[in-house]
Image (tube, rainbow, N blue to C red):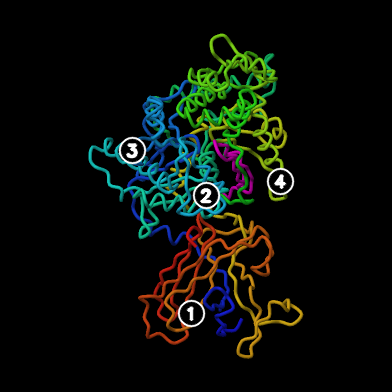
Amino acid sequence: TSAYSSPAKSLGDPGITPLSPSHIVKDSDADDAVEQLFLVVVAIDFGTTSSGYAYSFTKEPECIHVMRRWEGGDPGVSNQKTPTTILLTPERKFHSFGYAARDFYHDLDPTESKHWLYFEKFKMKLHTTGNLTMETDLTAANGKKVKALEIFAYALQFFKEQALKELSDQGGSDFENTEVRWVITVPAIWKQPAKQFMRQAAYKAGMASPDNPEQLIIALEPEAASIYCRKLRLHQMIELSSRAPVNGYSPSDTIGTGFTQGKEHVRRNRQSRTFMVENVIGEIWSELEEGDRYIVVDSGGGTVDMTVHQIRLPEGHLKELYKATGGPYGSLGVDYEFEKLLCKIFGEDFIEQFKIKRPAAWVDLMIAFESRKRAAAPDRTNPLNITLPFSFIDYYKKFRGHSVEHALRKSNVDFVKWSSQGMLRMSPDAMNALFKPTIDQIVQHLSEVFDKPEVTNVKFLFLVGGFAESPLLQQAVQSAFGLRCRVIIPQDVGLTILKGAVLFGLDPAVIKVRRSPLTYGVGVLNRFVEGKHPPEKLLVKDGTRWCTDVFDKFISADQSVALGETVTRSYTPAKPSQLVIVINIYSSEQDSVSFITEPGVKKCGTLRLDLTGTDATVPNRREIKTLMQFGDTEIKAMAVDVATSKSVKVGIDFLNY
């Protein structure tokens, strides 16, 4: 394209025409030298159901320390993470987080508790909100609304303070925030606005700032798991595939026993919270050769997302083979099924009222369900008992005028009985039925990924995340895919992402090639070509014929992008006096897009070039060269004024546009 001035009016953007589309791959190792010197990397695994942090000193990267144990804790749930629950006072000030928040809320008198704001499982809101902004609200258990950004910032600030306190106690002197590089994990399937939202919340929590963005890295959950899984030694994992019946055991027995031995092994190591990560590449890795592929399935509370990696020797760098996929198929789906079952037995009207009127008792009931949910297994024969809180039984009688027992007899739900000790007695079949819809979705989704041409010849499937502890999920994945690849579960499966995120923070350049999830570009004007461009796109200005709404593609969906690879465009202000250029960014799930008006093309953000403070004595026709990077966990941009070689302030925004 020749450098011509474009009519400004027709585009919503100030008149801009790309001058020089070009693609530069630069050696990404050059940047590593300018890394700031942080003393420690702290990773926060901010999960839907539970959260935690771990850290490592940059001087001894082979030691990963997992945070101290939390006060509180649940029967049947032993791990180092704490529930992702947060409590605000009636005045909307932060009160407590985790078990402390839950226990305090639980002990409040019902007349008082309805004024307190209790939040749980709120992370999913960032995934499910289509038009996420800084103003998006979350709803507390009592129905009141609070800005999501505040809640996320409170939670991150809580972890920041806990981690700094632990580091200070350990070192004997105050640890400064500036000495820490923070890593926050998010699902790989999250869209750009949700990642940016997390970054904004971290800025609000004081972890990093817009002036010092490198202090915070956003890590993708299955990528973090992948980095950790490569370091596994054989005693640190359980392989489901090699389960031929041994001396009279059927494979399903061994799943259970292998896991118990695994748990014993972990429990003995529970006292020490330090994990040694051997610097050698783990034994599993010694079986992987250059070009081998494996898939990591991260199944958590809210989402399941998966990534397919290929190994590049000798350094063992990773290359993503297929864009991250997944969906809201986390273990929360099992809780929803339980809630549906309760509605079926006791009536939806009652359950809705009970949740609003007795929110603390509802939380109790779900905790009781959680521990039974963890006891579900494919070969279980004895029933699972779920204690109903006294206020449930009491409130039901007031609400309906007959007993809970009567409701159970009357409902035609076969598998659930009332036991005289005041419990719901569920047969194993009834419990397994609650898991089925969610597990079926996971298996279905995995099958679709396995059918993609890029995903042939996968050697291993690593099943990680909290939901991977479920024997029902393990068995389903093993029976569906055990013949195609080896299914492997790390021992401390719930902490895999946390530890991998620390390793990622120590060496973010380990993943060299990623895939873009969407096609991105901007709208521009091109010279009108008869026969090529549709007549309705014709615009005549000063005797020149232009085609409007042309989509100038930066990158295609599922295209490989190397770390540090930049897409360059040059833009020119419509008038010399113009101080800000705002360019709309559009995205689509389709590869081939010709016009921004096509179906499926959405405006998704803005690129803003701030020309104030740059030298005004430059020639009339300024050229601003913009470089965008799509190969990292977030989309980044920088810009330079070509005439003066000075850098121009640039913002790329997917939240507030």
Tell me how far mark 2 sits from mark 3, CA to CA: 35 Å
Residue 305 on the magenta span? yes
The residue that mark 4 highlights is 456
Q: Can you give x and y, in whole percent of width and height, for residue 132 in the image?
A: 52, 53
Q: Secondary structure at mark 3?
A: helix
Q: Secondary structure at mark 1?
A: loop
Q: Earlier in the sequence, mark 2 or mark 3?
A: 3
Q: Residues within 10 Å of mark 3 (few under 14, many from 20)?
A: some
* Residue contact at pointers 4 and 2, CB within 8 angstroms: no
* Stretch of the chain drawn in magenta: 286-315
* Residue contact at pointers 3 and 1, CB within 8 angstroms: no
Residue at 71% x, 82% y is: 529
The residue that mark 2 highlights is 315
Tell me how far mark 2 sits from mark 1, CA to CA: 45 Å
Q: Earlier in the sequence, mark 4 or mark 2?
A: 2
State which mark lies toward you, 3 or 4.
3
Q: Secondary structure at mark 4?
A: loop
Most distant residue in the right direction: 531
The residue that mark 1 highlights is 573
State which mark lies toward you, 2 or 1.
1
Query: The residue under label 4 is which amino acid type?
Result: Thr
Tell me how far mark 3 sits from mark 1, CA to CA: 48 Å
Most distant residue in the top direction: 420
Q: Earlier in the sequence, mark 2 or mark 1?
A: 2
Residue at 53% x, 42% y is: 124
Q: Residues within 10 Å of mark 4 (few under 14, many from 20)?
A: few
The residue that mark 3 highlights is 162
Above or below, comparing residue 14 to residue 198 in the picture: below
Q: Can you give x and y, in whole percent of width and height, for residue 543 in the image?
A: 64, 90
Tell me how far mark 4 sits from mark 1, CA to CA: 48 Å
Query: The residue under label 1 is which amino acid type?
Result: Pro
